[in-house]
């Protein structure tokens, strides 16, 4: 759904430049991860992953969260919410990939960003949350 909006933005001139910005940035950010997923799982599941990511990004609410059925509606349209929920279920049940793929992607992006800041003479700051991933980034980049 979101990819279709992004592809048809010339035809349907969007009234909101902010939504165009979010869609474009989300597409650029996820593209390397989508290529990795495409090598592992069905293309339809990759599309569902992209739509799910964008729906969470756009519709996330701090106080109320998101229900799975709501996400299904955002992915396939409100009249086809059960179909969207089934697509999400198929993605999550797929045994050909795991969350470590996403963790590794975010770790690599973080490492690239830190090295970029250091090469520009800037001091990178990290949020320390006592999780294993924070320690991994610090050890990998060599802060301490």
Image (cartoon, grey):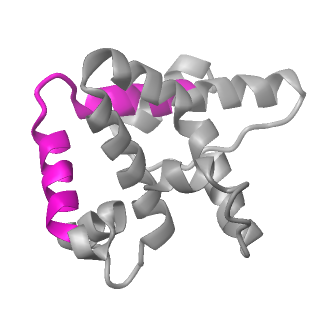
63 lies above or below 15 = below
Nearer to the camera, 58 or 120: 58
Q: Please state the horizontal and vertical placement of residue 80, each as a whole percent of the image.
A: 22, 68
70 lies above or below 83 = below
Secondary structure that dominates the magenta span: helix
Q: Residue placed at 37% from the left, 40% from the top?
A: 47
Nearer to the camera, 89 or 124: 89
Task: Answer whether residue 135 is magenta in the image.
Answer: no
Nearer to the camera, 29 or 134: 29
Q: Is residue 79 left or right of residue 12?
A: left
Where's the N terminus, which quadrant? bottom left
User: On the image, which quarter does residue 143 sit in?
Assistant: top right
1 lies above or below 118 = below
Where's the C terminus, which quadrant? top right
Q: Residue placed at 13% from the left, 32% from the top?
A: 94
Tell me if residue 67 can be seen: no
Q: Residue placed at 35% from the left, 53% from the top?
A: 52
Segment colored magenta: 81-108
User: On the image, which quarter does residue 101 sit in?
Assistant: top left
Q: Is residue 78 left or right of residue 127?
A: left
Q: Please state the horizontal and vertical placement of residue 97, each as a whole percent of the image.
A: 21, 25
Q: Please state the horizontal and vertical placement of residue 123, each as a whole percent of the image.
A: 80, 37
Task: Answer whether residue 97 is magenta in the image.
Answer: yes
Task: Kindly give the residue lying farthest to the right in the view shown.
Answer: 121
User: On the image, which quarter does residue 132 sit in?
Assistant: top left
Q: Is residue 64 left or right of residue 14?
A: left
Q: Residue placed at 28% from the left, 70% from the top?
A: 73
Nearer to the camera, 101 or 78: 78
Task: Kindly give the residue lying farthest to the bottom in the view shown.
Answer: 63
Tell me if residue 71 can be seen: yes
Q: Is residue 113 left or right of residue 34?
A: right
């Amino acid at each position: 759904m979101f990819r279709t909006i992004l592809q048809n933005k010339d035809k349907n001139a969007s009234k909101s430049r902010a939504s165009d910005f979010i869609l474009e940035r989300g597409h650029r950010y996820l593209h390397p991860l989508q290529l990795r997923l495409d090598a592992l799982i069905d293309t339809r599941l990759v599309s569902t992953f992209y739509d799910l990511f964008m729906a969470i990004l756009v519709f996330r609410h701090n106080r109320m969260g998101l229900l799975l059925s709501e996400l299904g509606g955002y992915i396939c349209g409100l009249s086809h919410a059960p179909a969207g929920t089934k697509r999400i279920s198929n993605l999550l049940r797929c045994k050909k990939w795991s969350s470590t793929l996403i963790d590794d992607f975010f770790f690599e992006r973080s490492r690239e960003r830190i090295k970029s800041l250091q090469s520009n003479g800037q001091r990178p700051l990290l949020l320390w949350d006592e999780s294993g991933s924070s320690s991994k980034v610090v050890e990998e980049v060599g802060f301490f």
